[in-house]
Image (cartoon, helix red, strand yellow):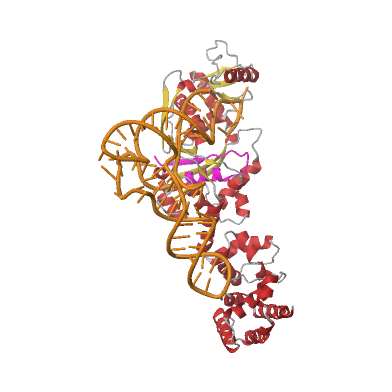
Amino acid sequence: MSVRVRFAPSNTGHLHMGSVRTALFNYLFARNQGGEFILRIEDTDRERSRDEYTESIIEAMQWLDMEPDEGPILQSERFDLYDEKVESLLQSGHAYRCYCTPEELEAQREQALAEGRKPKYSGKCRDLDDTPDDEAHTVRIKMPTEGSITIDDLVQGEVTVSVEELDDFIIRRTDGVPTYNFVVVVDDSDMDITHVIRGDDHLNNTFRQIPVYRALGVEPPTFAHLPLLAGLSKRKGSAGVQHYRDRGYLPEALINYLSRLGWSHGDQELFSREELVEYFGFDSVGKSPSNFDEDKLNWVNSEWMKRLDPSDLARRWVPFLEDKGFDVEFDERLAEIAEMMRDRAQTLVEMADVSAYFFSDDFEYDDSAVEKWMDPDHRPALEALIEGLEALEEWSGDAIGSLYRSVGKEHGLGLAKLAQPTRISLTGSTTSPSVFDLVAAFDRDEATSRLRRGLQLLDE
RNA sequence: GUCCCCUUCGUCUAGCCAGGUCCAGGACACCAGGUUUUCAUCCUGGCGACACGGGUUCGAAUCCCGUAGGGGACGCCA
């Protein structure tokens, strides 16, 4: 039987990093096994489910290039199926109607907790003789009364829980809406899911779900419960995918970074999508929770910025430059600038920040740099430089480099004496890529006019 | 309270399942040097961990038990 997995987020919020990792492990496993990856939206929470979040989830999956083979399938459109299954369980005696009120149940729960007992449903309605259909009621599943349940989890190994821990939970509410622990089983079996890969906050639920599979007469799938990400917070991945996208992270980097949280392949840190698919397996998935570390994400992102083709990088960079108010579009020059600047930034946003001077001459000069390098004695050399640039036959880094060296030689000045004033004139500070490439990145008129404007600094 | 899971450098992890080759390896971060026309990149080096206590064994990060700490679950949420 071919592998079928599903990623089943609820649409009660944006896709955060923890969910993305779960989606990723599902995706990688499916691809590794040549199986299918299905997206199912768990939208049975009438209170909190929102269509806009469904859209947001789909958008995030697209951006991350993890599009499902099937779906999105909405649970809210499958109520007929759930109803049918509830009725059949009622018929077969695996489920029963319960007339207890929420108030009663809540009181019992609190009392149990207060007495240090396990908050479990009493089973009061389990064996009722009179079970009217027209009176307000929920439907509960009958849990086994003795023995224990063992699963062989791909990540957690063998885990056993005594049925003492379980109670007859509600599978259909008073309002007729089925509950999670029921629909998840109905759907996973109906959709022929072979491997349920989810966060280990569901590990305990699994033991409630196994009896449901049995009551339904189907074989439970294989489970893989991934350890949760520890302490998610605003700085630690609780924000949505789009937030990271907007902060200038590349989808490749996010995927690469997330893949290494709880999974490893020897000492390798950087993985292409193909490598991830090829190497992924649950043998290499750890059982302990890991922390989202933005420093490392930054590093992975910077590595991916270096790996991308400069043109590709530049195209992705455009919106970030536009955000900063620069009127740019993709062209060869932008690709050159991106290639030149990518070593000095870890995100696209940061790269836009440090590249502002390429797109606007409205910048401040660094006072201490001016003080240190704009020496009036060097005016003749700098003027010769400008004239040389204006006369240069070929406008290239190499040609500009030759000019700098010869002017430096003629005036008996080291390269730094010419390079630093050039940087200050073109960028406002002494921090920039190689001056020759820097100058070449501007068109000739722009470069020389900034240099002439810079000459004024000599007198200050 | 009860049940389940977890515990190697600050963080991500290798090693653990098949005990010795581990006075524990790699990566991020940090610190120090080097390369360089500046900065960044890059290179080299440094700092830094087997939670604790028992046991098994000639030998334990690796196996067993316990303790502590952390997380999760216990809902007419998913």
Quadrant hosting residue A9: top right
Is the residue A162 above or below the residue A38 in the image?
above
Residue A270 visible in the snapshot: no
Q: Position of residue A299 (x, y in %)?
A: 53, 57
Quadrant hosting residue A249: bottom right
Name which residue lies at 52% across and 26% down.
A85
Name which residue lies at 57% across and 28% down.
A179
| Magenta part of the chain | A1-27
The quarter of the rendered structure image containing the N terminus of chain A is top left
Tell me, yes or no, whether the highlighted magenta stretch contains residue A199.
no
Tell me, yes or no, whether the highlighted magenta stretch contains residue A8.
yes
Residue A17 or residue A235, whichever sits in front? A235
Is the residue A46 above or below the residue A127 in the image?
below
Is the residue A125 above or below the residue B13 in the image?
above
Residue B42 or residue A307, whichever sits in front? B42
Name which residue lies at 60% across and 36% down.
A43
Disc tally is 0
Residue A62 or residue A437, whichever sits in front? A437
Q: Position of residue A244 (x, y in %)?
A: 60, 52
Q: Is A226 displayed left or right of A427 in the figure?
A: left
Toward the bottom, the furthest residue is A410
Residue A131 or residue A29, whichever sits in front? A29
The quarter of the rendered structure image containing the C terminus of chain A is bottom right
Q: Position of residue A354 (x, y in %)?
A: 63, 65
Residue A84 visible in the snapshot: yes
